Image (cartoon, rainbow, N blue to C red):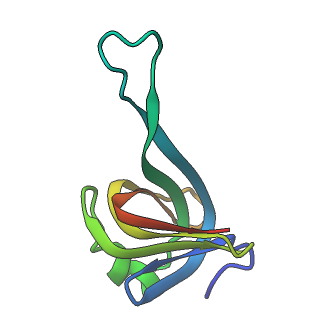
Amino acid sequence: MPSPTTAASVKFGATTIDDVSAATVNVTRQQIDVTAIGDAHKNHVQGFMEGTVQIEVFYDSAINSAVLANIEAGSIIDQCEVSWASGKSIKGKAFVQDISLSIAPNDVARLTATLLFSTNAITITE
C-alpha cells in the first residue's frame, strides 16, 4: 500500500511504483566552447541537456521487489518517468548510476537510487 506521504511516483516501462518518499531532480545543460584560434573573446553554444534524479522508495517486498530487484547499478531503463505530486515530471531513457537499500530498526526499508537521464530525448513537464 502506498504511503500517505508519497511525494512522487516512478514508472519503469508499464510498471508504476507509487511509494516514492522523496525525489530530487537536477537538470543541466553544459556550454560548449567554440572559440576559434585568434578570436578576441570566448564563444559558447548550448550543449545537450542532462538530468539526474535521486529517488527514495518505501521498499515493500510484496509490491515492488520484482521490479526493483532487476534494477542494478549500471542498468539502462528504456522508458523511465518520475512524476511529482505537483504534476511535474521527467521522462526518457535513464541509466541507474547507483542503488542502495537501507533498513533501520523500527523504520521502513528504503531503497535509494540515482537515475541519469541523458541518452536520447528528455521530456520535462512543468
Q: What residue is shown at x 47% (from left), y 52% (from top)?
A: 52
In this view, the residue in front, 99 or 109, is: 99
Above/below status of 22 relative to 49: below
In the rendered structure, the answer to whether residue 8 lies left or right of residue 29 reads right
In this view, the residue in front, 102 or 66, is: 66
Above/below status of 64 relative to 30: below
Quarter of the C terminus within the rendering: bottom right
Q: What residue is shown at x 24% (from left), y 56% (from top)?
A: 74
Q: x, y (%) of residue 72?
A: 27, 63
Above/below status of 110 relative to 79: above
Quarter of the N terminus within the rendering: bottom right
Q: How many numbered markers are drawn?
A: 0
Based on the displayed image, in which of its 4 quarters is residue 4 positioned?
A: bottom right
Q: x, y (%) of residue 47?
A: 41, 43
Q: x, y (%) of residue 33?
A: 38, 27
Q: What residue is shown at x 47% (from left), y 13% (from top)?
A: 41
In the rendered structure, the answer to whether residue 101 lies left or right of residue 119 reads right
Based on the displayed image, in which of its 4 quarters is residue 62 positioned?
A: bottom left
In this view, the residue in front, 32 or 34, is: 34
